[in-house]
Image: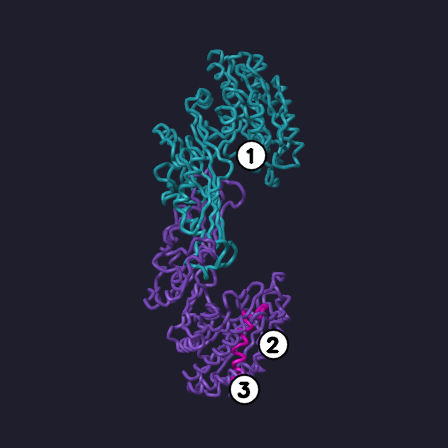
Chain colours: A purple, B cyan
Amino acid sequence: MSSENGKGEQGQFASWFDANRARLLGELGELIRIPSVSALPAHRDDMARAAEWVAARLRAAGVPTVEVLPTSGHPVVLGEWPAADPDAPTALIYAHYDTQPADPFDEWETPPFEPSERDGRLYGRGASDDKGNLLIPVAVAEAFGQAQGGPPIGLTFLFEGEEEIGSPNLRPLLAAHRDRLRADVAISADSGMWSPEQPSLVLASKGLAGVQLDARGAAGDIHSGLHGGMAPNPLGALVTVLASMKDADGRITIDGFFDGVRPLTELERAEIAAIPFDAAGYGRSLGIAGPVGDPAFTPLERNWARPTFDLNGIWGGFQGAGSKTVIPAEAHAKITCRLVPDQDPGAVIAAIARHVALHTLPGVTIAVNPIAGSSRAYAIDPAHPALLAARDVMRAEYGRDPYMIRLGGTLPVAEFFKADLGLDTIFLAWEMPDENLHGPNEFFRLENFDRGFRVYSQLFNRLSSDD
Amino acid sequence: MSSENGKGEQGQFASWFDANRARLLGELGELIRIPSVSALPAHRDDMARAAEWVAARLRAAGVPTVEVLPTSGHPVVLGEWPAADPDAPTALIYAHYDTQPADPFDEWETPPFEPSERDGRLYGRGASDDKGNLLIPVAVAEAFGQAQGGPPIGLTFLFEGEEEIGSPNLRPLLAAHRDRLRADVAISADSGMWSPEQPSLVLASKGLAGVQLDARGAAGDIHSGLHGGMAPNPLGALVTVLASMKDADGRITIDGFFDGVRPLTELERAEIAAIPFDAAGYGRSLGIAGPVGDPAFTPLERNWARPTFDLNGIWGGFQGAGSKTVIPAEAHAKITCRLVPDQDPGAVIAAIARHVALHTLPGVTIAVNPIAGSSRAYAIDPAHPALLAARDVMRAEYGRDPYMIRLGGTLPVAEFFKADLGLDTIFLAWEMPDENLHGPNEFFRLENFDRGFRVYSQLFNRLSSDD
């Protein structure tokens, strides 16, 4: 499809959208009215109802094969619309139809499950996260179906109902339906965007490695008067080994921890530096003077592109009021590390264990127990054709380059799709930082429904022409 | 009173004791039968009954003034027997009539409140701690009364009923009766002895200074993915400051902590070295390889004569199963230090606070909050005449020098008597380390009742002749 054709089609598409916008938003309202709160057992029937609604909506859009797949939890809706051209690529479109709980109800200005449009914003639980964003690619598929009998690329819709509770049943489903989920790229319609005027695309997210340290001294708690100066204190040994893992500037000092970590390239540093970061505002938001950490890197470099190490919890001995002169028998700490690409979680845990063995004070044993949930970092090749396509489409839509961002946290679906299906993921949705995603008065900017329709339709065309 | 006279008197005393021993032990049995468990409200009447029994026993011994003094808790029994010679010194005799609870009852071979004599040992709760030892100076006073109309020195008996629950009402009573409690020395009939064959006298016990550290970072708990590498972690800052307070050898590294601490003299080191310490046995008893700590001192020097520093508790962040990727807002730790003479608890706390301020990582505040209960160390002048007298009497009784020991813990009554009444305290009682003092099957070696009678009567004579 030539660019000329593309432009002509865009005109057609714009007309179609204008003609159907009110109906589409009415449908979004219908979906918001179904209180599909995955965390609450009382909404189990609503969850089933929402899945059936989404399946019916896909069928109405023209998707030829639609199934509601049961899981051990809430169902997954799977829709398959292969491209007419057998050489066209296929995209796996991910979103979720479940929402966070809506309490505290009395803080909502209008009821959470009664959609209310005010000032170009649609208020309601799930309006932005993720029902509004879920419907964008569905509407685009419908438009393509009506204009040309089907989308220019194959589309496989995978809409789950457990994103807000950690997707506990998604990976078994991916494994069970690996063949039907074969695709060239995944596109997640569940994602943030830098700001209403500033688009962004995600280049990477962090992996995770967690351990619990279990320190033990004497066989039981003992009296500090009888044993002070003679008995080992596992609390003292634990804080000593933990403190030895970072220096005063916040640099991680565990030998082997950085094995495999590539230095940031000048290009990567420049890309990150191009993104504004308000240190004073950041400090104000946390009630601190400003960001802290290894001065060799900027705050965003540290959060986005460098491994991090944090103590998440520590406990041992007496925690009550007053004092108890005890030398406790044991002490514990939990650590998680956020990893960058090329770091192996198992190797990181092994490095921690070696460090602990080297720095344990006499008389105390410290066991290093891995915590389940380790994962590798996710990163997409910055030159990935689908990412470049999305970048071009965003530039055309916004009149500016998207920020190419990284995340300090993890993106579970990206990791699942990579590990289980071999797919890279483009994140393309319009959840804004100020849209109260998990709180009262969640809303969705309706201008982004329009924008999303244009971006998705252009992206599908681009991916088709790239082929 | 000449030594000759003393010897003649001792013969008389021995006869008196032989004639009265069975009755005295029967009385000890009576007292054991009263379940004076101070910790348990169900025994409140028994406590009152025990106090009345003790008061009656003092009166029967000939003590001219005996009162049961109420307190906010259990009563104190006060008995006053001034010396006939107005120039004779007065000793304040301390002991306690309350006991620990007796559970678990089913681990007692004979019921805890039914005294049972087997193999020269009297079994029963409180037999050793402290009823058997309490009755020794009472019997000695009675013997003096019958032999010569009264004791050779003034005796003030102060028997409390709350030792096993921390003596919460003793200090107000000392303050209220300061004039009646005027004396030249205190003698505590509640104390351990090194072993059945090896006597010991206490030279010193430790003071105490406690603080809680309260570390705070961001205004609330935050997500380690969103904030890793940028936000301060109060747990990390807390372990860093705590770890900086000791070096790898266990030496305390807080500037100013040792202010006022005198180096151990060669004599003191020799005295401590003369006392056997079984490092391997100590290790076995705790399930560790052996004692640990500053290699510049022996284990007993560290425990007895050097200040110690121990973490008693630490907590903050996530303590549940699995992992939670949180950077907590706060973290806490409790510290107590055992102090030696010449250390001021307030100065130690100030040194800790200065150290914390110097070693707190950026972005975190750590408040240093003193914990109530600070006290100075207690020490008696090794040349104190009453201590020398006790040493001589012990040497004569045992045929060997007593160990001059120090305690790693605190001796609250010694501190109270010093602070509130200006009195030094001699500890003179026969609670042996193996007599199950707070556990099932507590017993008292009856040979020590005999020994105690001889030692106390000789000591009173010695104190009288020293005068």
The Cα atoms of the two marked residues, 2 and 1, are separated by 73 Å
Residue type marked 3: Gln
Can residue B447 be seen?
A: no
For mark 2, what is the residue? A26
The Cα atoms of the two marked residues, 3 and 2, are separated by 19 Å
Q: Which residues are magenta?
A: A122-146
Q: Are marks 3 and 2 in contact (CB under 8 Å)?
A: no
Is disc 2 surrounded by few (<14), some (14 to 19) or many (20+) residues within 10 Å? Answer: few
Q: Nearer the viewer, mark 2 or mark 1?
A: 2
Q: Secondary structure at mark 3?
A: helix
Classify residue B194 as left or right of residue B130: left
For mark 1, what is the residue? B166
For mark 3, what is the residue? A146
Which residue lies at the image location 40% right of the left edge and 55% below the top edge? Answer: A292
Q: Name which of mark 3 and mark 2 comes first in the sequence.
A: 2
Residue B23: x %, y % from top left? 62, 22
Q: Nearer the viewer, mark 3 or mark 2?
A: 2
Q: Are marks 2 and 1 on the same chain?
A: no
Is disc 3 surrounded by few (<14), some (14 to 19) or many (20+) residues within 10 Å? Answer: some
